[in-house]
């Protein structure tokens, strides 16, 4: 097996006609880049680059996931007898390895799918120009909405909002649309039905996600990552991610059979030592292209009809994939590279050190970051309303927060990570595609979780030694940005609550907030 995935170059009678670059998040045998592949004259190159693992301080599980999935995919290509060069263990950036190979083999034609990272896209385009070779960068057909279609949708719009894009996608692709052309159930969005906390006694028994055998390739990768990246954050002890297409399909089947039924109502709920809840855990497989979103949505709709599942659950899940996932990809390409530089509030504080260790006295952050270090995963509310909410309230430099999200989550590829972090969690682009900053006090966390019961801080106390830092910083943020919040109907009610707090108490809140902000590492 080892021999199958080491660097191999088949000797060809002539120079390769075309070189096809397959990146680590493009592991799809149905890829447009392989559609006209001729094994007799064309060649594929895949590159493991240590530079990609160190570009941000990547979680061990994320490195292992990419390497294992890539090596398994390489085996599939070899089974098809495709000519493959697999570069393993290079310390050079991907583009430098690619350049060496192009020069060595005298390549004139390079084919690839558009990368999911602006930086890499620009580098490949620059390389092709430098070497004066033909570059064919193809649209990623994995998505429902092409880049051009999204650009056309945004034309002449004053506001870019998910809801209207989502309705367009539903209509165009006939997803949850009845015979008369109306949304199933008579409404487009059942979001209000999908925000419940777990019962007071807890979530009860939750079916665990699908488990996968750790084969020879994955064992080798885990050993390699342990040895090569000992100082990187996170653990490999709980590694259980699908690394092949067959495993991804198994994970999908398991989700719709055993976990989908309770996903909707509790998708925002949080509970100590409940890292996955009823979530699908399919994002990493989707983002590596091991499974197609059309397959996921089709399977969910089949399960809905087969088991008569609640429509709000089905719609809520589909909205995340057909709606939000497609929307943020469109926004990423539309707004880059500006999106990566935006800092609407001009926040400059460094990321607290405990984001990398979980060693904080705040129970909510301790649990959300702790499970992230263990699994490389946290669900969307933990990311948005716990770690993201705190980062915004604590005035952390957006670029440092974005680097952390990109590094720490196994499913984080920049096209999906950056819009979610900078645009939604941090409001760094000033509401380009969100109508308000997503901020909340400790009261929200108490309502949606059991975190506060074991915490030294009290969410109902606004200032003082026992005050929840999230609560203090929330009110401080509202005081500081009162004019902005009062100017919008969506946020006016939040500042209206300030009127119930005396001027003296508001001054105390600001003073205590400053104390917290000056010693974030000590929380």
Image: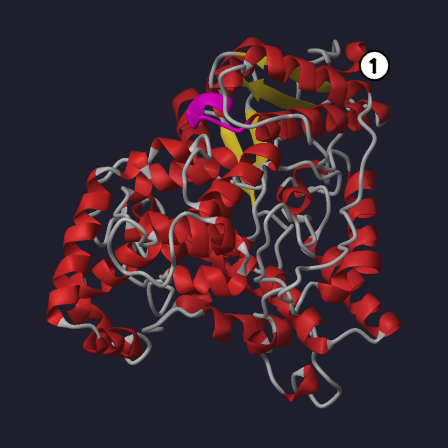
- Residue placed under numbered mark 1 in the picture: 1
Kindly identify the residue that appears in the image at 44 percent across and 33 percent down: 359
Span of residues in magenta: 53-59
Pick the residue in front: 330 or 375: 375
Count of labels shown?
Answer: 1
- In which quadrant of the rendered image does the N terminus lie? top right
- For image coordinates 53% across by 37% down, the residue present is 370
**Residue 55 among those drawn in magenta:** yes
Is residue 446 visible to the viewer in this orientation of the structure?
yes
Side (left or right) of 78 relative to 465: right
Q: Where's residue 58, x and y in %?
A: 50, 28
Horizontal and vertical percent position of residue 18: 63, 26
Q: Residue at x 20, y 72 (%)?
A: 501
Q: Give yes or no for residue 229 being in the magenta stretch.
A: no
Q: State which quadrant residue 198 falls in.
A: bottom right
- 135 vs 512: above or below: above
Question: Vertically, is 409 above or below 419?
Answer: above
Q: Position of residue 451 (x, y in %)?
A: 51, 53
Using the image as rendered, state which of residue 266 and residue 57 is in the foreground.
266
Q: Is residue 11 left or right of residue 489?
A: right
Image coloring type: secondary structure
Q: Residue furthest right?
A: 306
Residue 467 lies, in percent from the top left, at: 31, 54
**Mark 1: few, some, or many residues within 10 Å (few <14, many ≥20)?**
few
Position of 253 relative to 225 (above/below): below
Q: Quadrant of the C terminus?
A: top left
Can the viewer see residue 146?
no
Q: Secondary structure at mark 1?
A: loop
């Amino acid at each position: 097996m080892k021999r199958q995935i080491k660097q191999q170059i088949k000797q060809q009678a002539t120079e390769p006609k075309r070189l096809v670059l397959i990146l680590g998040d493009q592991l799809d045998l149905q890829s447009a880049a392989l559609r006209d592949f001729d094994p007799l004259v064309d060649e594929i190159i895949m590159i493991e680059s240590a530079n990609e693992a160190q570009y941000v301080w990547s979680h061990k599980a994320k490195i292992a996931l990419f390497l294992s999935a890539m090596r398994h995919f390489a085996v599939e290509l070899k089974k098809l007898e495709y000519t493959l060069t697999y570069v393993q263990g290079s310390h050079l950036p991907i583009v430098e390895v690619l350049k060496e190979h192009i020069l060595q083999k005298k390549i004139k034609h390079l084919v690839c799918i558009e990368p999911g990272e602006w930086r890499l896209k620009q580098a490949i385009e620059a390389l092709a120009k430098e070497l004066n070779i033909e570059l064919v960068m193809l649209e990623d057909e994995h998505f429902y909405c092409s880049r051009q279609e999204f650009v056309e949708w945004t034309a002449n719009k004053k506001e870019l909002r998910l809801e209207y894009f989502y309705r367009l996608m539903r209509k165009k692709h006939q997803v949850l649309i009845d015979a008369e052309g109306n949304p199933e159930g008579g409404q487009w969005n059942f979001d209000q039905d999908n925000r419940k906390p777990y019962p007071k006694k807890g979530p009860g028994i939750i079916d665990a996600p699908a488990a996968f055998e750790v084969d020879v390739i994955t064992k080798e990768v885990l050993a390699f990552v342990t040895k090569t990246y000992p100082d990187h954050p996170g653990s490999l002890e709980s590694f259980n991610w699908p690394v092949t297409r067959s495993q991804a399909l198994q994970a999908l089947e398991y989700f719709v059979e055993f976990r989908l039924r309770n996903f909707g109502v509790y998708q925002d709920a949080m509970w100590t030592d409940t890292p996955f809840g009823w979530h699908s855990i399919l994002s990493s497989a989707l983002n590596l292209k091991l499974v197609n979103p059309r397959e996921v949505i089709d399977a969910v709709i089949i399960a809905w009809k087969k088991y008569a599942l609640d429509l709000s659950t089905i719609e809520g899940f589909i909205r995340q994939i057909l709606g939000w996932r497609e929307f943020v990809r469109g926004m990423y390409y539309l707004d880059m590279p500006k999106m990566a530089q935006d800092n609407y509030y001009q926040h400059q504080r460094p990321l607290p050190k405990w984001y990398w260790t979980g060693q904080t006295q705040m129970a909510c952050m301790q649990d959300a970051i702790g499970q992230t270090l263990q699994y490389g995963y946290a669900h969307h509310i933990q990311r948005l309303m716990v770690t993201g909410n705190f980062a915004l309230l604590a005035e952390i430099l957006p670029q440092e927060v974005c680097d952390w999200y990109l590094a720490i989550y196994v499913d984080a590829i920049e096209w999906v990570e950056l819009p979610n972090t900078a645009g939604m969690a941090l409001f760094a682009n000033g509401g380009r595609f969100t109508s308000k900053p997503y901020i909340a006090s400790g009261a929200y966390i108490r309502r949606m979780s059991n975190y506060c019961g074991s915490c030294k801080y009290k969410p109902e106390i606004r200032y003082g030694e026992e005050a929840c830092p999230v609560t203090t910083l929330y009110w401080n943020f509202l005081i500081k940005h009162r004019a902005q919040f009062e100017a919008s109907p969506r946020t006016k009610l939040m500042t209206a609550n300030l009127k119930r707090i005396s001027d003296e108490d508001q001054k105390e809140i600001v003073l205590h907030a400053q104390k917290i902000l000056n010693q974030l590492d000590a929380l």
